[in-house]
């Protein structure tokens, strides 16, 4: 890994996380008019199309892959672009944007745990403390059942769906390193996104989606935003960052997700944040930073094998 590429990769991860945070709010609004699976197909279908047009026009060579890698790319696609959007979009029907973003902020924790399991290394006491602190933060938020947003109470179903989403993201962060050693981030993103979207199409048909002509201008604009910026651009930046940094270093930037979502949620959706949410948010962020500071320090002397896979 070239050191001069690290700052650019960090910027890419930060921008991606901000776009994901904005997408949380956009999806929270759009899912009121569009069924969750249909919204996922529209989002990643657009994203795949944008990436294909861009690659075909400017970097056709990046579309070439070894057919033997298709099953692995399919695994990435099903994990990140089939299961991930299903659990995320369905979960968004039960929780507000800021709460969803907080639960997604646990992704770095799962990434650290999975990376350690893959390379069979033990967590240090400091890392264990960070994991427990962040889990405690999530528990505080989940226990807070009294807050009500837009007349809908928080539900355990939504919380569990968003945690499952975070786990899918962590799995992708770790497994994607293998393909990123062979292909550019945009190539991996295109094939994984396209394959994942194809698996979503049959399920979305069952939802009997509304015609695009019946959607208002605001909803259509949100669909375009989550497809082009929160889909093609955001996931390409994220995967590109993964090709230059370790999964843990990239995943820590997901903490910008809840910050962006919280600010936009409070501004656009007029969501109120409870005291319990503030305490839980602080605990999650503190735990994640504790884990990643430790990993960063270790990485200088003992790189993760997955970084060079």
Image (tube, rainbow, N blue to C red):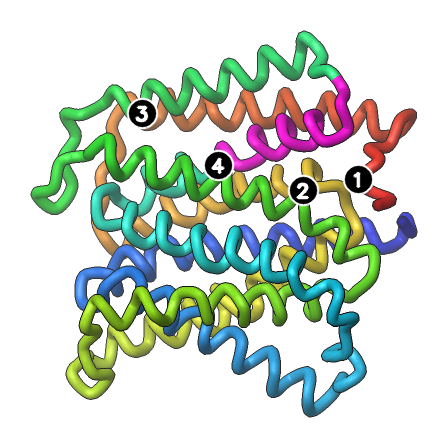
- Please tell me the numbered disc located at residue 198: none
In this picture, which residue range is highlighted in magenta?
A: 106-121
Disc 2, SS: helix
Q: Is residue 269 magenta?
A: no
Which is more toward the observer, 125 or 12?
125
- Element under disc 4: loop
Q: State the CA–CA distance, disc 2 to disc 1.
A: 8 Å
Outermost residue to the top: 125
Residue 267 appears anywhere in the view: yes
The 10 Å Cα crowd at callout 1, few under 14, some 14 to 19, many 20 or more, is some
Label 3 environment density (alpha carbons within 10 Å; few <14, some 14–19, many ≥20): many
The residue where tag 3 is placed is 141
Q: Do we see residue 8 in this rendering?
A: no
Q: Residue under label 1, please give it.
A: 306
In 3D space, how far apart are the residues under numbered discs 2 and 3 (Cα atoms)? 27 Å
Give me the residue at 69% from left, 51% from top.
176
**Majority secondary structure of magenta residues:** helix
Q: Are marks 4 and 2 in contact (CB under 8 Å)?
A: no
Label 4 close to label 1 by CB (< 8 Å): no
Q: Quadrant of residue 161?
A: top left
Residue nearest the viewer, comparing 287 with 164: 164
Residue 174, labelled with which disc? 2
Residue 170 on image: x %, y %? 57, 40
Tell me if label 3 and label 4 are in contact, CB under 8 Å.
no
Disc nearer the start of the sequence (4/1): 4
């Amino acid at each position: 890994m070239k050191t001069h590429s690290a700052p650019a990769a960090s910027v890419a991860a930060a921008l991606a996380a901000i776009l994901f945070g904005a997408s949380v709010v956009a999806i929270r609004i759009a899912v009121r008019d569009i069924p969750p699976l249909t919204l996922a197909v529209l989002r990643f279908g657009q994203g795949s199309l944008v990436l294909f047009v861009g690659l075909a026009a400017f970097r056709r060579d990046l579309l070439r892959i070894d057919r033997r890698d298709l099953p692995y790319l399919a695994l990435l696609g099903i994990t990140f672009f089939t299961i991930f959007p299903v659990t995320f979009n369905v979960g968004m029907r039960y929780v507000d944007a800021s709460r969803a973003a907080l639960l997604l902020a646990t992704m770095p924790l799962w990434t650290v745990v999975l990376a350690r399991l893959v390379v069979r290394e033990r967590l240090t006491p400091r890392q264990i403390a960070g994991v427990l602190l962040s889990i405690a933060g999530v528990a505080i938020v989940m226990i807070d059942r009294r807050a009500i947003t837009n007349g809908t109470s928080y539900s355990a179903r939504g919380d569990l769906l968003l945690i499952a989403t975070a786990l899918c993201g962590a799995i992708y962060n770790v497994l994607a390193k293998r393909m990123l050693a062979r292909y550019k981030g945009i190539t991996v993103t295109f094939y994984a996104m396209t394959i994942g979207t194809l698996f979503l199409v049959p399920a979305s048909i069952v939802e009997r989606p509304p015609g695009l002509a019946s959607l208002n201008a605001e909803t259509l604009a949100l669909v375009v935003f989550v497809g082009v910026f929160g889909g093609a651009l955001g996931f390409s930046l994220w995967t590109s960052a993964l090709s230059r940094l370790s999964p843990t270093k990239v995943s820590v930037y997901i903490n910008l997700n809840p910050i962006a979502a919280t600010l936009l949620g409070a501004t656009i959706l007029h969501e109120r944040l409870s005291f319990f949410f503030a305490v839980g948010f602080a605990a999650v962020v503190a735990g994640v930073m504790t884990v990643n500071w430790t990993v960063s320090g270790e990485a200088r002397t003992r790189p993760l094998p997955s970084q060079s896979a």
